[in-house]
Amino acid sequence: MEIVNEKDIPYRFDGISGPKYLLRGPYVDIGLVVLMPGEDFNTHYHTEIEENFFTLEGSVDIYVGDEKLTLVEGDIIQVPPKNNHYLKNNGDTPWKAVFVKAPYNPKDKIDVEWTPED
């Protein structure tokens, strides 16, 4: 059993944006992600992991495969394993979301050289 306060964990990008893991394993990863206007998160996929994003604030464009979807406050998306996904905040306010990845496997991330502009 563990209690974590999100204020005690910095975000990956300069401490103010990007992902941060609140709980890691043994069965699931749970964290927060913030993308500032214009920021993106590289295209990647997972071979076994399902990744879910629940938007708390702002909006983000998420590309799953070649399909572009826009998530707004209150939206949740389920990205099944083996689906490339890329996120970009094209809005003018920060996007903040909870992410949940399961099953737990910290090595299951394959980066893909692709952006929507390609």
Image: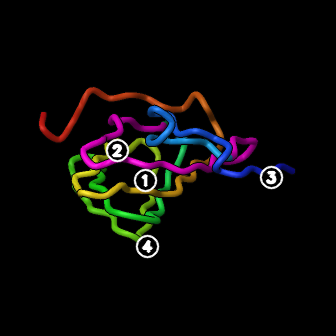
As drawn, the label of residue 74 is: 4
Proximity of marks 1 and 3: CB atoms separated by less than 8 Å: no
Judged from this view, the residue extending furthest toward the left is: 117
- Upstream in sequence: badge 2 or badge 3: 3
Mark 2 vs mark 3, foreground winner is 3
Sequence order check, earlier mark of 2 and 1: 1
| Residue projecting furthest to the right | 1
**Residue annotated with mark 3:** 3
SS class, disc 1: strand
Check whether the beta carbons of the residues at disc 2 and disc 4 lie within 8 A of each other.
no
Residue behind mark 2: 85
Relative side of 108 to 37, left or right = right
- Mark 2, Cα crowd under 10 Å, few <14 / some 14-19 / many 20+, is many
Kindly identify which residue carries mark 1: 79
Seen at 75% across and 42% down, the residue is 26
Which kind of residue does numbered mark 1 sit on? Val
SS assignment for the magenta stretch, majority: strand
